[in-house]
Amino acid sequence: MAEPNYLDLVPTEFFKTLIPSEYSLQSLFEVDYSKWDWSQLLPSNNFKFVEGVTPFSNKNFIFLSIFVYLLTVLTIKFLFSVLNIKGWKLGFVSGIHNLILCIWSLFMWVGISYDLFILFTTTEHGINALFCSPKSNPITGRIFYWHYIYFVSKFYEFIDTLIIVLKRRQLIFLHIWHHAIVVLIVWTWLPSGVAYASVGMFANTLVHIFMYYYYFRTSINPSVRIWWKSYLTSGQLFQFTMSFILAIPFLLQDISFNSSTGGFDHSCKGWGPFAFTMVNNLIFLLLFINFYLKTYFKPKSSKKTD
């Protein structure tokens, strides 16, 4: 019987595909938009993600979007600082933006909740549909349409950062990193059809309903005080903590030890995207804990100074 090779669990080849080393700056801008099928933005029971055909799905478009996002944000921040430009108020614009994201999050949460319920109550996948799309009998259909619409929403969320820098509000690393990397994370789910992504999407859209409603209210009326504000960050911490606990059913169904080779076999689709998501969830969790402690457990003297 061969000894377990735990390095086999690291999807090295998949991680290499996430490094944009094959692109020059010019090739990042050479996105073929002509093949995009815009009808895929509409709900469909037969939705199927096809890279290069599904809008916004091209790999170089993802890296281009992240590059333009970071360049735009840092350039505006630099210019405002050098030219000593005062922050813009943008109350109405910010309010409309946050209201759109609140409604969009509600739409996605209702959609994923309904289709998950239908999936695990009327198909042979059962409750396992929440965690594992088996390679032998993969999950298909509208459930992945919601994953895709969630992916599209991450481009629109770039505006969050743009509004912050235009207002000259404090911009923390957590915010920039989260918006930059989450587009890539969600994109990795789509080609493989990672069922476990439904758990993350369900939790994240639920938190975002309340979060963007809060931002909407405070954008329209900055003096408003909402008693459950502090629970938003707690909810995000809880969300990332639960992502690790709810990963256990996926791991139990997916990984099996092959005694003859010493390697590990995978029964569910998407081990690479799953591992990439978990690494980033750990980073998010640590950054959120740091943010939470600095925000709600600062020394009294520091709070007065702020």
Image (cartoon, helix red, strand yellow):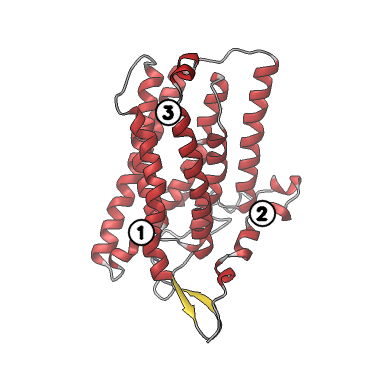
Q: Which residue is mark 2?
A: 19
Image position, residue 150 (x, y; %): 44, 46
Residue at 51%, 59% in the rendered image: 275
> Looking at the image, is 268 positioned above or below residue 295?
below
Asked whether residue 140 appears in the rendered view, the answer is no
Q: Amino acid at mark 3?
A: Phe
Q: Nearer the viewer, residue 63 or 80?
A: 80
Q: Which residue is mark 1?
A: 45
In the figure, is residue 54 to the left or right of 202? right
Q: Amino acid at mark 1?
A: Asn
Mark 3 or mark 1: whose residue is earlier in sequence: 1
Q: Are marks 3 and 1 in contact (CB under 8 Å)?
A: no
Q: Residues within 10 Å of mark 3 (few under 14, many from 20)?
A: few
Residue 297's mark?
Answer: 3
> Looking at the image, is 242 positioned above or below residue 16?
above
Q: Residues within 10 Å of mark 2 (few under 14, many from 20)?
A: few
| Quadrant hosting residue 220 | top left
Residue at 49%, 63% in the rendered image: 192
Asked whether residue 141 appears in the rendered view, the answer is yes
Mark 1 and mark 2: span between their CA atoms? 33 Å
Mark 1 or mark 2: whose residue is earlier in sequence: 2
Mark 2 or mark 3: whose residue is earlier in sequence: 2
Identify the element where label 2 is drawn: loop
Identify the element where label 3 is drawn: loop
